[in-house]
Amino acid sequence: MRDVAAAAGVSLKTVSRVVNGESFVRPDTAERVRDAIARLGFQRNDLARTLRGGGRTRSIGLIIEDVANPFYSQIARGVEDVARAGGRLVISGSSDEDPARELLLIRSLCERRVDGLLIVPSQTGDPRRRAELIAGTPAVFLDRPADDPAADTVLIDNLGGARTAVDHLLAHGHRRIACLVDLPEIFTARQRHQGYLEALAAHGVQADPALVRTGRHDVRGAGHAMTELLALPDPPTAVFAGNNLLTVGALRAIGAAGTRTALVGFDDVELADLLATPVTVIAHEPADMGRQAAELLEGRIRGDTGPPARILLPTRLVARGSGEIPPG
Amino acid sequence: MRDVAAAAGVSLKTVSRVVNGESFVRPDTAERVRDAIARLGFQRNDLARTLRGGGRTRSIGLIIEDVANPFYSQIARGVEDVARAGGRLVISGSSDEDPARELLLIRSLCERRVDGLLIVPSQTGDPRRRAELIAGTPAVFLDRPADDPAADTVLIDNLGGARTAVDHLLAHGHRRIACLVDLPEIFTARQRHQGYLEALAAHGVQADPALVRTGRHDVRGAGHAMTELLALPDPPTAVFAGNNLLTVGALRAIGAAGTRTALVGFDDVELADLLATPVTVIAHEPADMGRQAAELLEGRIRGDTGPPARILLPTRLVARGSGEIPPG
């Protein structure tokens, strides 16, 4: 606010009048103030919030990776239900895991003075730049932490869920268990990979790096990786698929190869129960993650100044058949 | 605008100054004008648009039935891609097929002065009330028409797709073909039911009302209906399922009953190709519907005053197995 006043060459009181839409400011002066605010960009939101008391636009911003992915559209639905109860609309955007796109979305949302932000943070950008843009806007992170110990965060128990998945395959006699996970930059992918390794270690099974394929970000990539794995001289008898898209890709590859490869997938997938071999999954409730994050945000918007919350949502194994196939 | 001036007891020029955030208005006068605008509710948007020249908020509103339904989340993704290219954010809301909820969303979006609206209109409300609220905001309707000949509309070829589905089952020898469709108020449900009847008539097959179940709006309702149909003394040998949720419900019921009932579903469903009997569907591109509607809206926001567009998107039959099962 001082920066704006200095840049526009006016008093703090004048800036306050312009931002609050009060009268008794000459049009050319008001124009200078607005120019200064626009030049200073992201500070505008902070300024407006401070001066207006916040909570005025009755809207929240939601940044996810891709609304077309059922995992994220279920999150969006949970968020919307809570926002609706609080009388707020949801302005949403897909970052496509692109940090520049994420920063642009945060900036656009803050410029629109949303009452708060819900963010699935992209994982390759600079957390400080994100934090600078968010500035004074209440924000809650979900699905992945934001490298900010002061931030509210809602996560799934990725490590525990992955361990449960691989424990289950080990209990059914598998020792050559493949692992498909997403980009190593992504927190959830690292956690699930770690859970896979911990489960093997806990059972005294030596991990074989040839069976681990990281950096698979879509159905097609997972399919290629699984096809390669099944073509190994000593192929895996089971696979842990690290998310819903990777599960679909692995299932397609296993179907095409015609093998009886066991599979446990992280995330439930629609129609999993109706497949030729119904799919065993590590299930959780994405809509519930959205709801809990939105409720935390609602509290912050209303002035809750308690210590940062870190909610860890449970997962559960749903055994349907594919995870109970014995080693061939 | 005249109404606001009259209600506030001020001149048109004064209203203009307040709405434009210009100076030289006494605070108490400005307050009176803002009160009048708030009291007059939905006209505020129209007023602000007229005075400001529109297009200022760089946002569009999207009203769908339920973002958690993959059909709608794919539409949302297509909309977002076009909005992004135009530098606009998407403010979205789920109407849940509730006309009061829809009106509230339209009102909220117009109060936020979105540059335009994309609406999947609910089908049980009063189209005139919707039209009144939308007033001067550019709007494009998608998936269903809005009873407004002046409105741009993007639809799927529901009638043709349904005819193709039932033609396909008839060509495989079926004569007792069941039909599951959504609430009869919903345009797409009526069109698909009509397509079913037309296909039967074109083949000289007498329609049996006992085989038609309308008003099925979710997976569970479709499952119950299908279970009842399979328990008839003379059960159907095939079923046409009128949307993605009804397809899932019918598949569950057929699986539970253990019958070899043929099925063609409207809308593609994820993993349809991996089911025990892969599912034959009438496929189309929801993301493309979202893109085309958003492009029409972008044109209107930029001042396109051409005649109303009515785009009909094609469907295609994807034969995967379930639609090619012969009569038992």
Image (cartoon, coloured by chain):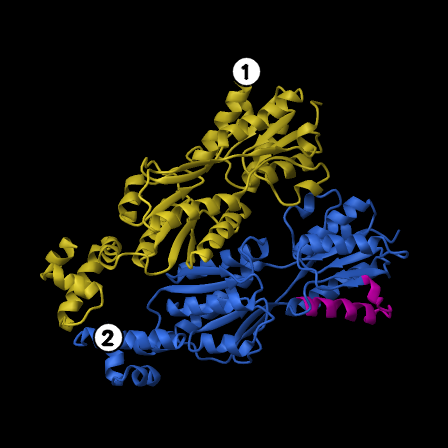
Chain colours: A yellow, B blue
The residue tagged with tag 2: helix, strand or loop?
A: helix
Q: Between tags 1 and 2, which lies in front?
A: 2
Q: Which residue occupies 19% across, 76% down?
A: B25
Magenta stretch? B189-211
Q: In 3D space, how far apart are the residues under numbered discs 1 and 2 (Cα atoms)?
A: 75 Å
* Tags 1 and 2 on a common chain: no
In reply to whether residue B205 is colored magenta, the answer given is yes
The three-letter amino acid code for the residue at tag 1 is Gln
Which chain is mark 2 on? Answer: B
Q: Give x and y (percent) for residue B141.
A: 53, 70
Residue A311 occupies which quadrant of the picture? top left
Q: Is residue A2 above or below residue B103?
A: above
Please tell me whether mark 1 sits on a helix, a strand or a loop.
Answer: loop
Protein chain holding label 1: A
Name the residue carrying label 1. A206
Q: Is residue A128 visible?
A: yes
Image location (x, y in percent) of residue B102: 51, 67
Callout 2 amino acid? Ala
Q: Please indicate whether residue B18 sits to the left or right of residue A163 in the image.
A: left
The numbered dot on residue B30 is 2
**x 50%, y 77%: residue:** B131
- Across and down, in percent, residue B185 comes to 66, 70
